[in-house]
Amino acid sequence: MKKTASALLAAILCALLLPACGEKTAPESASELPSDPAPQSASSGEKEPASGLPISDGSLTLSWFVPLYNSNVIQSADDQYCWQEIQARTGIDIEFIHPPVGSENDTFNVRIASRDFPDIITWQWINFAGGPGKAITDEIIVDLRQYEEYIPNYRAIIDSIPTAQPNSTLDDGAIYGFIHAVPDPIINATGGFMIRNDWLETLNLEVPTNIPEWYEVLTAFKNGDPNGNGEADEIPYIASSGMGEILNFSTAYKVRSGYYPDPEQDGKIAYGPIQPKFKEFLAEMNKWYSEGLIDPEFPTNARKNIDEKMTSGIAGAFVGAIGSQLGSYNLTGPETTPGYELIGVNSPQTGDGISYTVYDSILQGIGNQCSAISTANEHPVESVRLIDYLYGDEGRTLLNWGKEGESYEIVDGKPQYTDLIMNNPDGLTKLDAVASYAVPIYGYFSAFYLDSYSAINLSSPQQEEAAAKWSAEDTGMCMPVLFSTEEEGDIISKKGADINTYTSEMLMKFIIGQEPLDKFDEYVDNVKQMGVDEVISIYQAMYDRYLAKTK
């Protein structure tokens, strides 16, 4: 099997990702999460009827461009058991082309600009400048409708996820690639509000559920010495220069910091930062900042600053990621702060008791990554059959679980990771231990199993409970995946980018008090003069086309 090819450098411009949404409830605790049915044994050697294995007699080699994950453990996907077996069973040799870690966008851009296309390209095609439709028009990737007879496994997966169906095709029906299917919203519940539970217990406080309660709790964090060192060194709420950790509070006012379907206007598209209620939200955040409830250093905070403040015992709450922050901080926090516990909590409720999520991806049914067939591919049928195999029971089991008897075993009819993965004798983390066998977290070539994903990525009770809470939040203000025409994309990238830049600057100034809120109306007029109404109308047209696909 061929090893990883070297890659190049450059940069890619990305269009706005607006994943699909809808309402759904989720279990209150991860112990109630639905389990996946036992997949077909990946070690049985049985051939998948729909694929007609082998696909090739071993003489076919296909090049596949795909970002490399777990690079601290593997140097190529060729090092993983799942891919070794996939190649052996399909009879197709895969030459994996992995861009250098940290230079993925650069490498991709050079490949596209030079029209040096591998046979298969796994990329965030919904983020492609101009959208995947432009990638088809520019003859970079092909429309897969002509190969639909060869993708029964893929169609079965997509058809089983209602929210995935309208997002898997363009507005004209084109199939732009094999999307990363996400069958359960919990898998996409990757971040949200978090708070120090040990501080709440120390001060006899309840988890805050709305803006007044958050204000009360943060004030108590500031004045009550919850870390017990006798010093007034607590930072009640931390945020970074991107302001996402602050702007997420806006949903309590039924507005968002971008474009969204307004639940109070029959779902018509609105731009939050110019709404009257957004002024109310800014006034509250300005009050919090002036009273020292928000980290005064947030305009310059980078990720390393967040990490340091959250694990050193001086910060009380923020918005973060379920793995690299909630999971990680609960491991490292107790080393310096006995009793340290960080938990996930719901977004603050509106006046009528609704917690809206700002994570558009939670119920979209798909992930960002998508494997497309390039126009340089001289074996499109075999390539399509290869990828479709990954969506069937056998391929999906290989990718999610690895090797039966080593990385997993069947217990009571269901697959479970072995101690080699869950309690690695060499001290490897679960994610690193499984990397030599399977891709249950970074498995963007097929569809996750919830059981395998949860076992690796939701490894603590705090993570399980947070995922259940976040995935249950209302998605009434979420945007679906929208596809623009080339003309629409040009306007969004020009006017929309200028509007976003100006808005971000002004929101920061309003929050920290560099601009008084009595200038809010003047700021709104400026945004309108920059063409926001035209951009809103474009998003409305795109949204209407999306709705037409759901009927």
Image: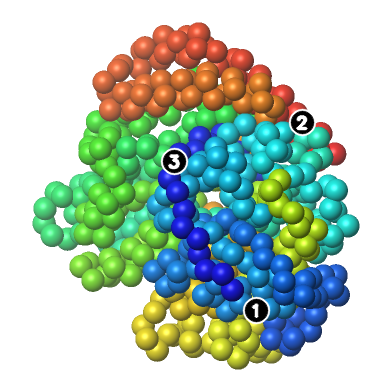
Relative horizontal placement of residue 267, taking residue 526 as reference (left or right):
right
Q: Nearer the viewer, mark 2 or mark 3?
A: 3
Instruction: Give the percent coordinates (x, y) of residue 417.
Output: 56, 83
Quadrant for the N terminus in the image: bottom right
- Picture quarter containing residue 355? top right
Which residue corresponds to the image point at 49% horizontal and 38% vertical from the top-left?
12
Instruction: Give the percent coordinates (x, y) of residue 443.
Output: 59, 64
Q: Which residue type does callout 2 highlight?
A: Arg
Picture layout, residue 472 above or below residue 142 = below
- Most foreground residue, 65 or 204: 65
Of the numbered discs 1 and 3, the one sitting upstream in the chain is 3
Picture layout, residue 80 above or below residue 122 = below
Question: Which residue, given by chain and number where applicable, does mark 3 sit on?
Answer: 10
Of the numbered discs 2 and 3, the one sitting upstream in the chain is 3
Question: Which residue, given by chain and number where applicable, does mark 2 sit on?
Answer: 545
Question: Which residue, given by chain and number where applicable, does mark 1 sit on?
Answer: 85
- For marks 1 and 3, give the CA distance: 34 Å
- Picture quarter containing residue 535? top right
